[in-house]
Image: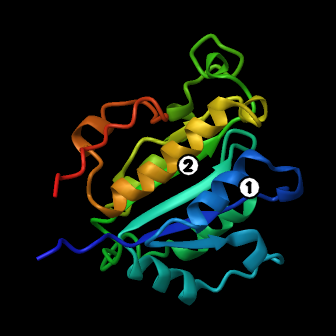
């Protein structure tokens, strides 16, 4: 019997999509990936009136939750933070009886404007990217989600149109496929500060 594929929910948040190139390409790759439900939050909720029941049902219906976004002031874009504030309710995602999404996987997919060297102690941004995303990691912990280090594209604007962007896109497709097929080596992944296209610990597909 074939193992059941995981269902993946990608929540995409970018408030300035007309200026986006990297995230637009990543969004297209995700939306075309088999087994992925792709949601453009800014298109669905332009006035920030989030349908909590719809969003909670989406979480219940999927096994892997992906936040895809560009770093905005060292955090998520505002609508994605609003989504967290409203959807991850006490009694649903945490607290007494709040175990409805426990056991699912959670993956941030992040682009930055600055290069990797900016994200270190003593660098321009003073903190590693993983440290800046610690609120997301702790949110995952509180909700009983298994946190996967962020799949990251540093210096995204400079990657447009070159081989680095192509490798990152292909890595994203492979990562989504591996999550769907349970072929991401989680023990190896969680030891990495971030995931990149050249560090993805993928388990090889079985030979037919």
Mark 2 / mark 1, whichever is N-terminal: 1
Q: Quadrant of the C terminus?
A: bottom left
Q: Name the front one of labels 2 and 1.
A: 1
Residue at image location 69% in from the left, 61% down from the top:
13
In-front residue for pair 162/35:
162
Q: Give the residue displayed 50% in from the left and 34% down from the top.
A: 130
Pick whichever, 15 or 141, lies toward us.
Answer: 15
Asked whether the beta carbons under mark 2 and mark 1 sit within 8 Å of each other, the answer is no
Q: What x and y, as percent, mark residue 66?
A: 50, 60
Residue 143, percent from left and from top: 37, 63
To which quarter of the image does residue 97 belong? Answer: bottom left
Q: Can residue 91 be seen from the camera position used here?
A: no
Q: Residue 157 vs residue 32: left or right?
A: right
Say the numbered circle drawn on residue 24. Answer: 1
Q: Can you identify the residue that label 2 sits on?
A: 109
Secondary structure, mark 2, is: strand
Quadrant where the N terminus sits is: bottom left
Residue placed most toward the observer, 146 or 86? 146
Q: Can I make out residue 147 in this image?
A: yes
In the rendered image of this protein, does residue 165 appear above or below residue 103?
above
* Residue 36 in the image, given as x and y percentages of width and height: 48, 70
**Whole-percent x and y of residue 125?**
68, 22
Identify the colour scheme used. rainbow
Neighbourhood count class around disc 2 (C-alpha, 10 Å): few under 14, some 14–19, many 20 upward = many
Please, which residue is most extreme toward the front here? 208
Vertical placement of 201 versus 119: above or below? below
Disc 2 and disc 1: Cα gap in Å? 13 Å
From the viewer's perspective, is 178 left or right of 174? left
Q: Nearer the viewer, residue 7 or 136?
A: 7
| Residue occupying the point 71% across, 51% down | 23
């Amino acid at each position: 019997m074939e193992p059941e594929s995981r269902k993946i929910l990608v929540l995409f948040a970018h408030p300035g999509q007309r200026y986006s190139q990297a995230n637009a390409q990543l969004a297209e790759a995700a939306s075309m990936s088999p087994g992925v439900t792709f949601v453009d939050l800014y298109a669905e909720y332009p006035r920030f009136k989030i349908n909590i029941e719809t969003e909670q049902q989406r979480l219940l219906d999927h096994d892997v939750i992906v936040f895809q976004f560009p770093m905005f002031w060292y955090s998520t874009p505002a609508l994605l933070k609003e989504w967290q504030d409203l959807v991850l309710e006490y009694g649903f995602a945490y607290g007494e009886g709040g175990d409805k999404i426990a056991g699912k996987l959670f993956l941030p997919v992040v682009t930055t404007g600055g290069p990797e060297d900016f994200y270190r102690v003593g660098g321009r941004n003073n903190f590693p990217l993983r440290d800046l995303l610690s609120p997301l990691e702790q949110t995952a912990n509180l909700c009983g989600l298994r946190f996967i280090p962020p799949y990251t594209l540093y210096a995204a604007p400079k990657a447009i149109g070159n081989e680095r962007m192509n490798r990152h896109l292909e890595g994203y497709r492979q990562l989504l496929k591996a999550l769907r097929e349970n072929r991401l080596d989680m023990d190896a992944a969680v030891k990495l500060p971030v995931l990149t296209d050249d560090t993805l610990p993928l388990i090889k597909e079985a030979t037919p």
